[in-house]
Image (tube, rainbow, N blue to C red):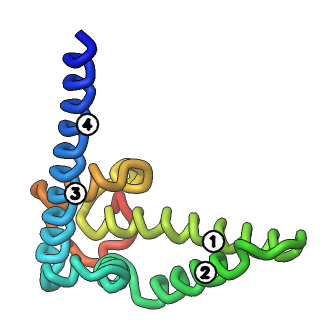
Amino acid sequence: MFFELILFLLSLGLVAWLAAIAIAVLSVIAMWMIFVKAGECGWKSLIPVYNIYILYKICWNEKAFVLMLVLEIIGALLNDKEGWFIGLLAFLASAALLIIQILFCDKLAGSFGRSRLFATGLFFFNTIFIMILGLGSSRYYGPDRGTAGI
């Protein structure tokens, strides 16, 4: 009985690993397809940081990416410091990053002709909604499409 219980728990672990690998592979394929739909080379989706730059280029502009990157660096540098003013600066940088991420999700959804509700899904359930964009029938309309819902 005890041996069967351990075998069962180990098999659950194996199933979890297989599910995680399947989700990771589907996410990579979906991101590749988003890039291809937008007219970019799919391999660009495999390079860390550069893929985010290309995503910002696809749905917004490069300046927003630079602003996001600078705020990330400022937030990381201020994270370990003490003092109320430094804490306030770190909080403001984090709040600005949150706003940029919300706008980015809105712009990405709009670039593919999706609604603000879809942008909300992109923000909260990013992996699932990236798969819907990449593997689904979404068509790329470009950054000129504006915000979602237009």
> CB under 8 Å between callouts 3 and 1?
no
Q: Nearer the viewer, mark 2 or mark 1?
A: 2
Q: Residue at position x 79%, y 76% from top?
A: 81
**Residue, disc 4:** 13
Q: Eyeballing the image, is 73 above or below 24?
A: below
Q: Nearer the viewer, mark 3 or mark 1?
A: 3
> Quick check: can you spot residue 138?
no
**Residue, disc 2:** 71
- SS at mark 1? helix
Give the alpha-carbon distance from disc 3 to disc 2, as whole Å: 28 Å
Give the alpha-carbon distance from disc 4 to disc 3, as whole Å: 17 Å
Q: x%, y% of residue 70?
A: 58, 86
> CB under 8 Å between callouts 4 and 1?
no
> Quick check: can you spot residue 61?
yes
In the picture provided, is 64 more to the left or to the right than 46?
Answer: right
- SS at mark 2? helix
| N-term mark: 3 or 1 | 3
**Residue, disc 3:** 24
Q: Amino acid at mark 2?
A: Leu
Give the alpha-carbon distance from disc 3 to disc 1, as whole Å: 29 Å
Q: Amino acid at mark 1?
A: Ala
